[in-house]
Each structure stands twice: as C-alpha cells, then as structure tokens.
Image (cartoon, grey):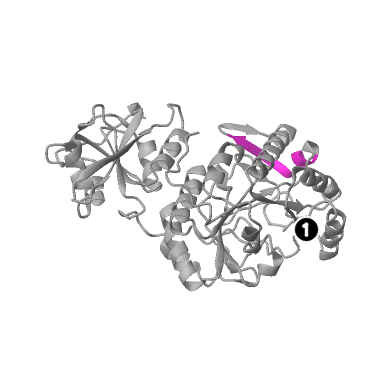
Amino acid sequence: MQTIITTPPTAATVDPKSAASSVRHPCFNKESSGSCGRVHLPVAPRCNIQCNYCNRKYDCVNESRPGVTSGILKPYQALEYTRQVLEKEPRITVVGIAGPGDPMANPAETLETMLLIRREYPHLLFCLSSNGLAMPEYLDDLAELGVSHATVTLNTVDPAIGARIYSWVRDGNVVYRGQAAAELILERQMEAISGLKARGLAVKVNTIVIPGVNDAHIQAVAEKTSALGVDLMNLMPMFPTAGTPFGELKEPGKDVIEALRAEAGPLVPQMTHCRRCRADAVGLLCNDRSGELGGVLSACSKLVPKAQDDRPYVAVATREGLLVNLHLGEAKRFQIWGLAENGTFRLVEERQAPSAGCGPSRWEDLARLLSDCRAVLVSALGEAPRKILTERGTLPAACSGFIEDALALAYGEDGLARLEALKARRGGLGKSCCGTGDGC
C-alpha cells in the first residue's frame, strides 16, 4: 500500500514507546482520568462486521455506549471540530477515532483525519479503536502517522464462540457467516495485535462480557492477550440493545465483572474505570461534555470544503507536463504543484498513482495520496471517483488546456468554487476548456 506521509511527526513530540505517553492517556492510566481528557472524532460510519449485541444509532444524545454519535464528520470538518473543542476544553490530551462504525472499515477518512490532526497538533496522543478485521493492512500507516495507542475488541479466541457473537463479517466484497466468519476475524485480530505491539504501540483489548456466551471464556482470552504482550484488558458488560439478537439478555452485574477481573488480573492488567464512551465522547472520563458540545459538532458537520493552508497543493494529470490531458483512470503519476513566493507556480514533486483496479478502494487510496491537495485537474473522470475525492476534500476538476491556466483559476479567489461550477460545461479556463468527464 502506498504511504501517504510526506513529513512524519517529530519523534520528540510523540513517542509511542515512551511511558510518558500512557501517563497522559486517561483510559490507559486511571490516575490521569480526572485531569487528562479525550475527544472522539466520529468520522467512520461504516462497519465491516455485525455483532449480535450492536445496533448503531446516529442521534441519541441521552445514550452512552459505543456506536452512538450525534453526527458524522468528514476529515476537514473533524479538524475544525478539534480546534473548537481544544479552545473549550484545553485538558484534552488524546484524539481518538472509535466509530460509530470501525475506523479501518473507513480507511480513507480515518487516515486523512489523523494526518490533518497530526500536522496541526503534534503534541496530542492519537488513539483508535477497531475490531481488528481490516487493521493489518494499515499497520505501517498507523505507526508512521504517530498513533500511540490502539484498542482491539477481542470477544473470544474460540471460533465456535465467535460464531454465536458475529452475525456476519465482510472482507472486501465477500461476506462470511458462522464459524468461517469467526475464524477470519480471529486470525486478523491476532495479526493486528501482534503487529501493533511490534511497532511499539500501547494496546488495550476490549472484551464484551456476554452472559451465557463468552462469560466462561474470559480466562482463555486473558491468557492469549498476555502471551501477545497486551498492555491492558477492559472487560465491558454487554449493554442489552433493543432490536439485536442479544437484546433480551441481562446485563452482567458489577459483581460478575469484578470477579472476572480478579481471575484475569494476574495475567494482564485490568481497566476498572471504563465509561463505555460514545463515538463522539469529549471531555474528561468523569465529566463527559458530548451533550454540551453537540451543537459544535453539528455545526462543524455542515462546513463545506474550502481552500485551506492544510491543502496547499494542486495535483495534475498530464502526459508531458504542459497540458492537462489525462483521464483520471489513465494517470500513472500526478504532478503536484504549489504556489511560489513570487506568486507563480512551482512543481513540487511527482507522486505515483495507486495501482489500477476495480472498486472504490483505488479512489480511496488516491484520496489519501492527495490529502494535501485542494484539487486534482484531469481531462475526465467518472462519478464514483468524483464523489469519493470530493467527500475527502480534494475537488476533482475535468478540464483541458495549459496547466498554468488551470492553476491560475484553482488558486484564484473562489477558484475551487468556480472550478466546480465549470465542470459541467466547456470554455471556462481561458486557453483551456472544462468538461463533464465520464468513464470509471
């Protein structure tokens, strides 16, 4: 997979291997939970598994549990939301992504959000929570982005039990059910945890205690996590959620959870202060402000893309470096242009395009590759890549003619808005022309 980092974080700023990093993480260090806060950025709506206890809701302000959020943010909106949250709650030390789906089932949104936050706030810790299914593919990206802490939800190490917990598991375009699904996700979870530890990240395992399903299996999960070098285990009582197969089960009591922690504690350290945080949780663990700041999140979710300093470049698909004359799907590389100090344009570099292939994953990879570009200029493109790139904050513009003419418009006042308006007609770029584009 093509790396998307151009300037990695300074090691002195965030060192995932330093003990000091976990001291500032309220979930990994109970003593700091009253002084260090977290903000969860709900940028990952899609999930690649269906657990029999989960029913994701998007607008339930009075319910506190994973999978719940009052809104969904795009990466550039998440950056602005973070700015405003830090002004109102300066005790935030951790930025996390925990859904409401799975971060790695939304890799483009997750990785771009982390990159944007890391560039502006290198002093913050970065954390994400995942079911682990799609995590192995992105381990190097997470480490290079400076992610210091990760949580993997590991409910069982026995596929027979897993078959009762997971309704289905989707890997790419293939859906697995029953024990085949459980075997696949367990294999990926083991690979993810091992890979995270090998890259120096602090790892927490969340285990949902489901009465009559896996409550007699916790010791086996603890033994496996201990062997993998997991730093912390969080036994979470299942929250009975209406409309799910496990909705009629009784929530395990405090005494049950404490007894299980006592059994697992000698094998792996136990978390005892979990608040079952929402996907948009913000503030201290003991003083969550997600309801109070819900209006800020809602306002940020309505922001529209604009030319910002965090997207200083424009990408160009060109055959010879003079004209915009390549279809998006034909481009094997992109020229990256920026503004020079004298107001002219300078060629910054060339970037290799993601490998050709079918499906949206290619365009999501491209969106990550161009995450610092406000626009990409091509001769034509299809609606699928146009939608994905636009949602990720890189405006695709179908045009032809001299590169400098197109760049002048892209960097001009309201240039991106004009490019977008011109995409459906011709004759708008001076010596160039603009068209709708088609194809895949």
Quadrant for the C terminus in the image? top left
Q: Is residue 60 among what the camera can see?
A: no
Decide if residue 193 is on the left or right side of residue 429.
Answer: right
Is residue 147 positioned above or below 275 on the image?
above
Q: Name which quarter of the figure residue 289 lies in.
A: bottom right
**In the rendered image, which quarter is residue 183 located in?**
top right
289 or 64, nearer to the observer: 289
| Disc 1 residue type (three-letter) | Gln
Residue 66 horizontal side relative to residue 230, left or right: left
Q: 134 and 17: which one is in front? A: 17
The question of residue 166 being in magenta is answered with yes
Q: Could you tell me which secondary element the residue under label 1 belongs to? A: loop
Q: Position of residue 46 (x, y in %)?
A: 54, 46
Rendering coords of residue 38 (x, y %): 58, 64
Tag 1 residue: 270
Q: Is residue 375 above or below residue 233?
A: above
The answer to which of 246 and 51 lies nearer the viewer is 51
Could you tell me if residue 406 is visible in this image? yes
Q: Relative to residue 366, is residue 64 drawn left or right? A: right
Horizontally, residue 72 falls left or right of residue 222, namely left
Q: Position of residue 60 (x, y in %)?
A: 57, 63
* Quarter where residue 256 is shown: bottom right
> Is residue 221 highlighted in magenta?
no
Where are the magenta residues, as a range?
A: 161-171
The residue depicted at 76 percent of the width and 63 percent of the height is 272
Q: Position of residue 24 (x, y in %)?
A: 62, 64
Residue placed at 77% from the left, 37% from the top?
A: 159
Task: Name the residue: 64% across, 44% down.
Answer: 196
